[in-house]
Image: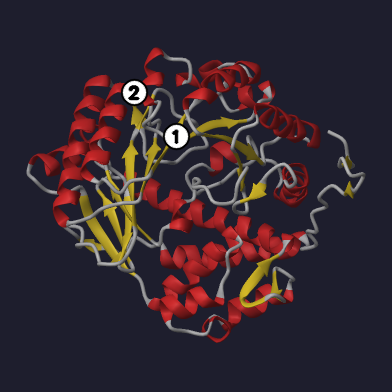
């Protein structure tokens, strides 16, 4: 790709030059601060719950459905998943549809549906049946997002999802065969070129294809990262997501020192990503890029303050309360069979906790707005979160928008901070999942 772009009218557009000036010691300090808040707010000091609350009139909601099965388990992943067994998976999908009927009985409708895993496409016919059922129950659903890995893209049943899924996110991680081999993905999913060819063949099935990449692997040089970005760009997908490798308490032994690059490389790698993708794509969040700036993406929590999760191991956030569904497949099936939803725990958050969470999402998404905090919390953002606002201003992460006093501009330093904060938040959520899975016995799986 040329470093200088010449337009037909001879105007010269300079390539994007990411202005990340935050020193590594400050990034490390921010990590420690985030770890403190994550440990404080994501503690499992929950109380028991039997049912979700009814919807609040005027609020918009998103439906999340979790499919906890994979054909193989990746060492760096702590999402809630089990080794695929067809009989258990088919029974699970039946229960999932029954739980959605209970949600309907509470009075919910949804604008959007996100299906995550695990590997959502382990049984394409059951997945298609579940999406059709959701659209019948909740007629306001306008878009369905789904995840898959490269293994299923050319399977005969994959075409059943055409017309049902609006956005398919494909976990590529890297097109580099050495990285794929190191992460045990080469034998499972094929070479980078094979994955490229499968995605190219599946593009016509869905309005939006998203290519998921991960940076921060050991041996992922500038050349390797650029190759990944160039391969993704050649596919010309509607979206590209570039996640940082996340290290949790549970994956530390298998990832840190074996799979993960030194922490100090993150800023340089992220700078390269910004320089390569900005100009080709609009930045949707700190790590997501899209052809347009008004389409949904993986971090549905940005577009929806409230979401309801169905399925084993799913989370819901409703009325400032976190609800957790049972992580035991056995208990999940028993609860649904008895006419109960999968939820078994809840934790309420204070107004200050929720404001800090929304501030994190505003930094991450680049949508930090004084008006949002005034309308939703009845507060002045600058005084209500004085410490957070002052620290971000001091390091040049945010600045006032000269054209709109209610809007705050998140700079490249702010994007770096948003990425770092969200990485620690998601690592904390992974730790919660791992703790909830720890008591499971063979009979629960």
Quarter holding the N terminus? top right
Q: Determine the residue located farthest toward the front in the rendered image.
A: 9
Q: Is residue 33 above or below residue 217?
A: below
Q: Picture coordinates of residue 79 (x, y %)?
A: 42, 41
| Observer able to see residue 262 | yes
Q: Identify residue for label 2.
A: 124
CA neighbours of label 1 inside 10 A, class few (<14), some (14 to 19), many (20+): many
| Front one among 401 and 6 | 6
The answer to which quarter of the image holds residue 252 is top right
Q: Identify residue for label 1.
A: 147
Residue 84, numbered circle: none
Secondary element under disc 1, as helix, strand or loop, is strand
CA neighbours of label 2 inside 10 A, class few (<14), some (14 to 19), many (20+): some
Horizontally, is 133 left or right of 200 in the view?
Answer: left
Residue at 72% over, 43% down: 277
Q: Picture coordinates of residue 22 (x, y %)?
A: 76, 63
The answer to which quarter of the image holds residue 232 is top right
How far, Cα to Cα, is label 1 from label 2? 12 Å
Q: Is residue 375 above or below residue 313?
A: below
Q: Is residue 344 above or below residue 408?
A: above
């Amino acid at each position: 790709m040329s470093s200088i772009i010449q337009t037909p009218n001879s105007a010269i557009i300079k390539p994007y030059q990411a202005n990340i000036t935050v020193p590594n010691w400050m990034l490390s300090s921010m990590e420690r601060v985030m770890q403190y808040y994550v440990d404080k707010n994501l503690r499992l000091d929950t109380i028991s719950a039997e049912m979700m609350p009814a919807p609040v009139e005027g609020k918009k909601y998103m439906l999340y459905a979790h499919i906890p099965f994979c054909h193989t388990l990746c060492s760096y992943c702590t999402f809630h998943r089990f080794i695929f067994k067809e009989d258990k998976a088919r029974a699970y999908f039946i229960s999932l549809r029954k739980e959605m009927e209970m949600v309907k009985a509470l009075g919910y409708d949804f604008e959007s549906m996100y299906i995550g895993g695990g590997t959502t496409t382990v049984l394409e016919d059951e997945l298609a049946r579940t999406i059709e059922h959701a659209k019948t129950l909740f007629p306001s659903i306008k878009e369905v997002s789904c995840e898959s890995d490269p293994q299923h893209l050319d399977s005969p049943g994959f075409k059943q999802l055409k017309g049902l899924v609006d956005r398919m996110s494909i976990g590529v991680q890297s097109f580099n065969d050495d990285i794929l081999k190191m992460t045990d993905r080469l034998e499972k999913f094929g070479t980078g070129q094979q994955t490229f060819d499968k995605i190219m063949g599946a593009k016509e099935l869905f309005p939006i294809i998203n290519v998921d990449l991960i940076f921060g692997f050991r041996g992922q040089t500038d050349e390797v990262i650029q190759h990944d970005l160039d391969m993704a760009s050649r596919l010309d997908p509607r979206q590209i997501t570039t996640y940082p490798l996340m290290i949790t308490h549970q994956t530390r032994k298998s990832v840190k020192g074996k799979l993960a690059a030194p922490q100090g490389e993150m800023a340089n790698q992220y700078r390269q990503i910004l320089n390569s993708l900005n100009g080709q794509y609009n930045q949707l969040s700190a790590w997501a890029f899209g052809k347009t700036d008004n389409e949904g993406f993986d971090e549905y929590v940005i577009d929806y303050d409230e979401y309801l999760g169905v399925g084993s191991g799913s989370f819901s956030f409703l009325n400032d309360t976190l609800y957790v569904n049972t992580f035991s497949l056995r208990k999940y099936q028993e609860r649904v069979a008895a006419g109960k939803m999968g939820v078994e725990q809840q934790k309420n958050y204070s107004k200050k906790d929720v404001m800090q969470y929304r501030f994190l999402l505003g930094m991450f998404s680049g949508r930090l707005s004084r008006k949002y905090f005034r309308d939703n919390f009845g507060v002045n953002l600058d005084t209500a979160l004085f410490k957070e606002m002052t620290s971000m201003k001091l390091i040049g992460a945010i600045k006032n928008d000269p054209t709109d006093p209610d809007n705050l501009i998140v700079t490249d330093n702010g994007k770096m901070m948003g990425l770092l904060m969200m990485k620690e938040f998601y690592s904390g959520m992974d730790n919660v999942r791992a703790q909830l899975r720890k008591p499971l016995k063979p009979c629960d799986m």
